[in-house]
Amino acid sequence: MKKIFLLLAAAALFTATGCEDLDQAPISSGSVPTFYKSPDDFNQGLTAVYSALRNYPDRTLTMSETRSDNIYGVSTQGLRTWEPINNFSTGIVANEYPADTWSADYLGIYRANVLLDQLEKNSSVLTEDLRKRTEAQARFLRAFFYLDLVRYFGRVPLIDKPLEPQEVAKIQRANVADIYNLMIADLEYAAANLPASYPAAEAGRVTSGAAKGFLALTYMTRSGATYNIQGPGLGTNDYATALRLLNEVIASNQYSLVTAAGTAGSPYANVFSYTNEGNREVVFDIQYLSGGTGLGAGYPSILVNNNYFASIGVGTTFGTGDELRAAADDLLRSYPTGDQRKAFTYQIGYTGGGVTESRAAFKKYIDGPKRGTSRTDWPINFIVMRYADILLLKAECILQGGGGSQAEALTIVNQIRTRAGITAPLTSVNLSTLLEERRREFAGEGLRWHDLVRTGQMLTVMNDWIAKEDTRNRIRKPLNANDVLYPVPQQELAASSYLYEQNPGY
């Protein structure tokens, strides 16, 4: 059931009193709406906050996946808008991807702030239980958007209430530590006030398990390497706290690894099956529905091209018209014998549109016969966090000294490998081998860049990889600590009358 996104069309169009300002840009066009007057107003307001997640997968497959060593995204037919992201160009202050990320995250924050403000002023129309659950969801989503911003941009403006445009224009970028304080408070409230699960009719809403999982990830991100910049890592050593939260998610018994192949061909493939959505591995996902109603997903088409779709017999209208963003050779070589994740995740070579392609296409999210009406109308949900991530984050906390034992971490990694069909277990594990396992497990899911940055391995891994993989000599090298962050978008510098200073290196 996909009830959350069934409501999004209405959320994008409604103009009821008190809700007409929810689609305005949060930074340059902030506005304070009139009071909400009914439970339906609050429900529509909350749905509008969820709707800001709609294009999150599209952005993360460029901002994180394409930026990482999982993709060699060098074009052969002219410069693509995503290629400067791949190439670490310092001239991306006006690039659409950082600009869209900043704008979309702040739109979500603005909508959450409006809803929270109205809950404080006019929540008497709601039952106490509904008020708490509504507030908890809004605060989770606000923290989610802020975590996205901090990981990409470091210091950003801290806005926790709806403001008029002239007030917004006076707010400078906050210290990262202060933004974490807000995120942690929001996620703690969400974890304490959200249910463990929902009825099927409310599938897609955030749960207490998701709140604890993201709270753990937030602590781990804050604990990450500082790189001596004002970025997401503050070196706070919160791994014991994060481990406790992850253990609580595990002990809840709400989630488990998918271990049955079903009709998908392998247990790993079954995690992403179009007929197995909402399975017990899903901790938090973004819901989509095809059918030409504007509620479908576009992200399955992001990394592949028209020729790939021609090769699987669904025509060329499902591609972006763009070039293939090919999987890195180094990534493909890393899979051990028998690893079922490789065959499911990639199509290595294909012929379509009169062209034979030897490189590997990401096909994890593509099931041609179950497509919608266009390349932006796929029905498949995007899993933002799944139980395999919870387990491997636990192993990371252990290896970072947060508690537990090396034997526990090794057991977790081998559990993930066994599910993938690998019969030869590892006999030891360290942070590097753990990251390589995460790389294979979550390839194409937008986690790799954040994993490298969080663990302090971005510079070493990326510079080594670029030296081996950049056969066209298009990626700027060597990378330095400033490359951890993206630039503040030019449009935001201008909207703030250049109150914001640019991140170093741009």
Image: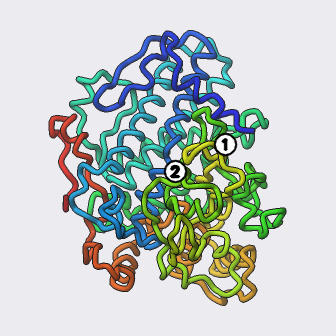
Residue 444 position, x and y percent, is: 54, 64
Residue 206 position, x and y percent, is: 63, 41
> Badge 1 is on which residue?
207
Foreground pick, 445 / 354: 354
Q: Quadrant of residue 265?
A: bottom right
Residue that sits furthest to the front in the current view: 354
The answer to whether mark 1 and mark 2 are in CB contact below 8 A is no
The dot on residue 57 is 2
Q: Earlier in the sequence, mark 1 or mark 2?
A: 2
Residue at 73% over, 49% down: 278
Residue 269 position, x and y percent, is: 72, 65
Instruction: Report, in whole angstroms, how far the alpha carbon at label 1 lies from the one at label 2.
Output: 20 Å
* Amino acid found under the numbered disc labelled 1: Thr
Give the secondary structure at mark 1.
loop
Residue at 62% over, 35% down: 292
Foreground pick, 504 / 421: 421
Q: Quadrant of residue 108?
A: top left
